[in-house]
Image (cartoon, coloured by chain):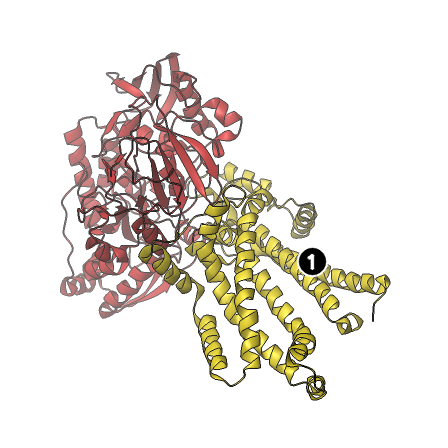
Amino acid sequence: MRLSPRQVAAFLGRRLLFSAVVLLGVLVLVFLLVQLVPGDPIRLALGTRYTQEAYDALRAASGLDRPLGEQFLSYVGSALTGDLGVSFRSGEPVTQLLLQRLPATVSLALVGIGIALLIAVPAGIWSALHEGRVSDAIIRVTSQLGVSVPDFWMGMLLILLFSTTLGLLPSSGYVPITEDVGGWARRVALPGLTVGLVAAAIMTRYIRSAVLEVASMSYVRTARSKGLPAGVVVGRHVLRNALVPVLTIAGIQLATILGGVIVVEVVFAWPGLGRLVYDSVAARDYSMIQGSVLLIAVMFLLINLLVDVLYALVDPRIRLA
Amino acid sequence: MKRRTFVSGILLAATGAVAAGCSTGEGVDLDGDGDTGTTGGTEGATLRVAIGGEPDQLDPNKTSAYFAFQVLENVFDTLVQPDENLEMQPALAESWEVSEDQLTWTFTLRDGVTWHDGSPFTSADVVYTYRRIIDEELANAWRFSAVTDIEAPDERTVVITVSAPSPNLLSNLGGFKGLAIVQEANVTSGDIATKPIGTGPFSVSEYRSGEVIALTANPDYWGGAPEIGGVEFSFISEASTALAALRSGEIDWTDVVPPQQVAELEGDGELELGVTPSSDYWYLALNQAREPWSDVRVRQAIAYAIDRDAILQAVSYGTAEANQLAIPKDSVWFTEYSRYSLDLDTAQSLLSEAGFTGGTLDMLATSDYPETVTAAQIIASNLEPLGITVEIRQPDFSTWLDEQNSGNFDMLMMGWLGNIDPDDFYYSQHHSSGGSNAQGYANAEVDELLDAGRVETDKDVRKQTYADAATIIADECSYIYLYNPSVIQVWSPSLTGYTARADRAIRLAQVGLAD
């Protein structure tokens, strides 16, 4: 059954509208962040020795002296045009600083999710199809371990093994892929593996239960009983239907990683968004924190939108719902 | 004098006091490209340094971040600069004279100094920089409070006029890289924040946000071209990562070392460790505007009741240096003083004399400086036997400042850093009209001594003046001084000629990289 372009457009329109509402909510929260924090951000930015004139000037420059409603409208207006203000700490435009950090985080996220999929898809399917056997038990225990291990500890163990003991890979640092592919690959290996292993553990469990659920459906029983080869049953009936929950969890994982694997980036001194958020929080750089949260929320929304569209391609029932 | 910035950076610097081990570690070229490797020991190699965070900006007059000064120490110069004993020596000024009335300072600038862009350095640059700091009311403008005029009669002469004799003028001008001489064109173009041009031993050649700041040796440096070819600063905030990078040869030097690692590193034969007391100090202050803390006997009782050793262990794993005055023992201004020891009987009898029968104490700590919270917990249990119930508050630092300034506390703990001259250590904190006297201490004799020290030009007399003032201050517990924290650094044995310093300056102009 194929859908008309109109139905697809209506589906996308609904999703976009929904995203816009969420975005507005995020904007309100992000805006209120500065109003709600304890202490005076202007004072923090100035340090301990300053004159009243300097205080008033910075307060006026940051717009914090205007009425709340006016501040909000001006913030939203600027944010929608890509102007997120200037960093309290460095005085550089927030948008520019965020864009500088994006490539490092995107490359780490893609490597991480790639590693996770490479491990989780075969492991999850194998585990489900061999339910109750030894291999299933091993995969389940291993993935439970992976979920339980904190990522900073995993990162340190990997550094200890691959950098300190074996001397194979650098423990920290970053080279843009555009400059030196080999250098980038060597440096992304350990943080990518850390992110990937943790995500793989989570995804393996989801994939296993999704496959198990579909495999117990009556249409799978029917397909089996009418004598279809096992490969066809698994490929055409089980996996295709199990794809929806897998897409969901993969999307969430990707968005989470993009949204700043703060701890991993800090451990590996990776100059991405997570590190930026960490530094900004440590420095109480509120405009920077606002910008980062907003960017992360937008990325989350975009990935959710993408996953929704993929659902529709995979499973026509969802479009009609 | 500078209040610790609220960005909690890792403390730094050390005078190579404890150098552990002597075997050289074997470096691994992890890049596979060799060009940034240092293990070859060739002239012109790049020194790789890991600091705990990224500078906010590279304008020395505007930044207050220690991470920025770690880099800028090697890019900019001041008129004079402190040597290893923190005494002022010639830098951009090769000599100076003070007029008979002590009110006019004439500096003769070094000849032939050039900026990194090749243009000549002149007296106009000095006047521009100082006027910029004063006129724009930058964070260090207070260092010029005694200065009434700055002139440049010719290209190599700068004349500074002061309103009263100012023996601490040199340490104000050179004790801190925040007073570095900058280039007007570099400032007006706005480049100084990311592409600064200085006169120092290295120039900034590359800055990639979040990744690296690269410096290249300045072959025309007035102090002689550096032996190494350049420096790469990377930013690693996680100590275990920094140490792993050092051990595997990815970096040559780091100060991202928590005090709890010191004991382990002391036994590590493959790394050099430097631990030495800094000129920072941490103290307690009781609010003398409130009863019963206005009574000197009650304050002294607390000074006798606190367990300084326990606090030292808890906050620094024993790496800090106990001190009952502010100035550390390595300084020429150090005064011996050890009145207080843990003595509950003395404390109890002082309280009885004062008629104190017990009560609560509102202790202001801050979560931004965890040592204050740790110490407060120890102090709370120390004071319990005296019938004092300590209620600990730990707001963020900006709230802490508000509470301090509005006098809303019984006792607080905080630290000061970056002091060189004794005036910086004592005047604004303990003079009755001092700007940082939040505890409300007032003693006419101390005021007199601090005023006299400010204008006393005979060094021995001046030292005695401050020793007298400090002794009264500690006797009367205006501050209850606790300790000088240590600066902790670790480096590879291939780094030669490096001297870590008590003032936290990381000077790399003279270092080499050996095999």
Q: Colour of chain A?
A: yellow
Name the chain letter of the residue that bears numbered label 1.
A
Whether B108 is drawn above or below A117: the answer is above
The spot of residue B37 in percent (x, y) is: 35, 40
Residue B228 in view in this figure: yes
The quarter holding residue A224 reads: bottom right
Instruction: Name the residue rendered at 53%, 39% in the picture.
Output: A91
> A283 left or right of B177?
right
Q: Secondary structure at mark 1?
A: helix
Q: Quadrant of the C terminus of chain B?
A: top left
Q: Amino acid at mark 1?
A: Leu
Question: What residue lies at 64% left-to-right and 46% top-to-bottom?
Answer: A66
Quarter of the figure that contains the N terminus of chain B? top left
Figure disc tally:
1
Residue B310 place in picture, x, y as percent: 21, 62
Looking at the image, the residue that sits furthest to the bottom is: A225
**Rendering quarter of residue A320:** bottom right
Q: Is residue A231 left or right of residue B307?
A: right
Foreground pick, B180 / B418 = B180
What x and y, as percent, mark residue B350? 18, 61
Q: What residue sits right under mark 1 in the picture?
A: A24
Relative to B176, A188 lies left or right: right
Write down the colour of chain B.
red
Q: Position of residue B418 (x, y in %)?
A: 31, 40
- The residue nearer to you, when weighing A245 against B322, is A245
Viewer can see residue B364: no
